[in-house]
Image (tube, rainbow, N blue to C red):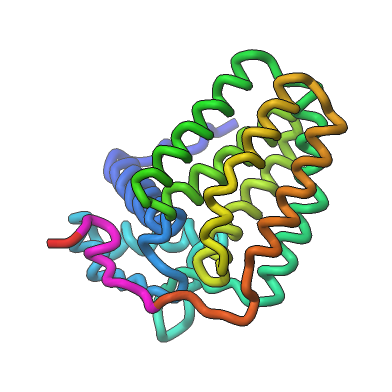
Amino acid sequence: MNKPARPAPKELKQNAASATVAEGLELAIHEHRLAPGTKLGEDEIGEIYGVSRTVVRSALQALAHEQLVQIERHRGAFVAQPSLREAREVFEARELLEPRTAHSAALRAVPEDIERLRRHIEDEHAALAASDSGRAVRLSGLFHIEISRIADQNTIAGFIETLIARSSLIIALYWRRESALCESHAHHALLEAIAANDAKQAEELMRSHLVDLHSALDLREKGAAPRSLKEALIGPG
């Protein structure tokens, strides 16, 4: 039986460069440095990262697969803009999946898991103290993803991770109560319930937390105008 051909060194280098570009763009999207609707010009991104258009195109295709980027024929690539309907559906799906995941996580959590969750909350508070709401949103999402991993339900965890990625874009577009980011008692209460292995309480707390987040969306408003790629990715010149 013939063995599959190994990628050539040049291909491996391009793959690594593409992954680096994709990670940089993804982080900028999740931290709201790149707003929904921002045009992602291949030439500009290539110049910022010092890579070819081929590498950039591969990175954009990867992000399109994750639904973070929308590629339009003859127009190019843009940070995705979830519709009002999708915003509702994403949070309704989270309200269905995550309470049961919190229930399972509470039954399985060990001290090391609790410590990781505690560090997530501390990092989130530090971001809020620094007035970095975009980073706080990303860290909040990671807190929820960590709970799904503790639950040890890989298929559901994958769904939740995708939904949370979409939630970051939805929050950037439709968030109307930024003070909700500071409502840290919700994550603290979840942490305590999971630490106590109180599955029923963890499930109820997660459900009410997600309903509250959903209520903080204004599904009539639009996000701010996109900023420049260079400023979003590497800061002001």
Residue at 54% from the left image edge and 52% from the top image edge: 181
Single out the residue that lies furthest toward the top.
111
Where, by quadrant of the figure, is residue 101 drawn?
A: top right
Q: Residue at left 23%, top 69%?
A: 44
Q: Position of residue 36 (x, y in %)?
A: 46, 71
Residue at the bottom extreme of this rendering: 74
Q: Quadrant of the N terminus?
A: top right
Q: Is residue 195 left or right of residue 118?
A: right
> Is the residue 68 above or below the residue 127 in the image?
below
Image location (x, y in percent) of residue 39: 37, 75
Q: Which residue sits furthest right? A: 200
Apparent side of residue 202 relative to residue 190 in the rendered image (left or right): right
> How many tags in the picture?
0
Q: Which residues are magenta?
A: 225-235
172 over 142 or under it: above or below: below
The quadrant of the image that shows the C terminus is bottom left
Q: Is 230 one of the magenta-colored residues?
A: yes
Q: Position of residue 194 (x, y in %)?
A: 73, 26
Residue 54: % across, % down: 31, 62
Using the rendered image of the protein, determine whether residue 164 is visible from the camera's viewpoint. yes
Q: Residue at x 42, y 68 (%)?
A: 35
Q: Nearer the viewer, residue 135 or 104?
A: 135
Query: For this rendering, which residue is in front, 21 or 172?
Result: 172
Viewer-nearest residue: 141 or 156? 141
Q: Is residue 84 left or right of residue 155?
A: left
Q: Residue at x 50, y 27 (%)?
A: 119
Say if the magenta span includes residue 105: no
Image quarter of residue 218: bottom right
Residue 18 seen: no
Horizontally, is 87 left or right of 208 in the view? left
